[in-house]
Image (cartoon, grey):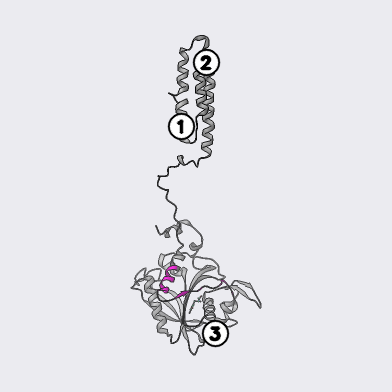
Amino acid sequence: MKNKIDLITNEIQNFKIEDAVSLEKFRIHFLGSKGIVKELFNDLKSVPNEEKREVGQLLNSLRAVAEEKHIQAKTTIDTLNCDLNQIDLSRTADDLQIGSRHPLMLVRSEIIEIFSRIGYTVSEGPEIEDDWHNFSALNFAPEHPARDMQDTFFIEKGENEMALRTHTSSVQVRVMENSTPPIRTISPGRVYRNEAISARAHCFFHQVEGLYIDKNVSFADLKQTLLYFAKELFGEKAQIRMRPSYFPFTEPSAEVDVSCSICNSKGCNVCKYTGWLEILGCGMVDPAVLEASGIDSKVYSGFAFGMGIERITQLKYKVNDLRLYSENDVRFLKQFTSGI
Ligand code: DAH
């Protein structure tokens, strides 16, 4: 019996536990309910009485050696729990939470796509802008109310006046200064105005500016371009109407309404029962603006337009509060998950 215990002690010491599988094998083989240690304890009955005490002690220490080895190996394996045997590589992966694109970015991309189909490129300009590009080159008179402190966030006053751009029309000027016609470009971007934040106004929002300069560009080209745009964005049935308006940088100027796609122009609270929704401002680029930007107004003419992305998104997705766009409320944002 003592010999047997010696042999088993050796066996325990030499048993190689390398992973969870061999650990379990070890446990069953030596410490399991039908394992060797148990078996030896059963054999104790047949040991002569005078040896029982000694053999019993030897068996106790044999069991202690086996248990100690088991605990130590288990701890090592648990800490190295990157053990591949513990990972079921054949299991299907958990679903990843898919984020969603922001509704303003969805609409921005759609607008870019619609215009790129008729040859418009995308140009961008700085959000911190000088007086020349944001106002002066666009024909804003020195005392024009739009330059007022109330509307504009000034960064630096005085000679090197710098401000957060109040519209993306500033990019028009930059594009005209840096290229020769024909020019066909749109400029999406963020703009800033010093306004109190409410459901209907915000201190920053997004616009897309459009500019087309070439020889013999007429108001009819402007009208057809915007009609094409409205039909692509709101559906084939969309109609547009133009109302005379005023902007310092266009002459003549117009505001464009699109037929209300929510009620099919029957009248609803979104279109205030008029059947029409205002979506953008536009006009023929004022010759003074062409000249200020280095383009010969006797040779070239062109049109420009500018629209608010928030406004169009509001119409497309029936968003009734501008603040939702910038509050990062997941309940709002997740409605725009593409479901890919
Ligand atoms: N910049 C104008 C605004 O922020 C929008 C606009 C109107 C842009 C007419 C244009 C335009 O290019 O021709 O309200």
Q: Is residue 199 left or right of residue 118?
A: right
Q: Nearer the viewer, residue 125 or 316?
A: 125
Q: Which mark is residue 24?
A: 1
Who's the residue at 46% across and 69% down the image?
309
Q: Are marks 2 and 3 in contact (CB under 8 Å)?
A: no
Residue type marked 3: Gly
Q: Position of residue 168 (x, y in %)?
A: 52, 74
Residue 305 visible to the viewer: no
State left or right for residue 69 relative to residue 222: right
Q: Nearer the viewer, mark 3 or mark 1?
A: 1
The reply to whether discs 3 and 1 touch (Cβ–Cβ < 8 Å) is no
Residue at 53% x, 84% y: name it: 289
Between residue 141 and residue 270, name the one nearer to us.
141
Q: Which mark is residue 55?
A: 2
Query: Residue 110: horizontal and vertical position, in percent?
Result: 42, 69
Q: Which residues are magenta?
A: 109-129
Amino acid under disc 1: Glu
Mark 3 C-beta to ligand 1 under 8 Å: no
Q: Which residue corresponds to mark 3?
A: 294
Quote the CA–CA distance across marks 3 and 1: 83 Å
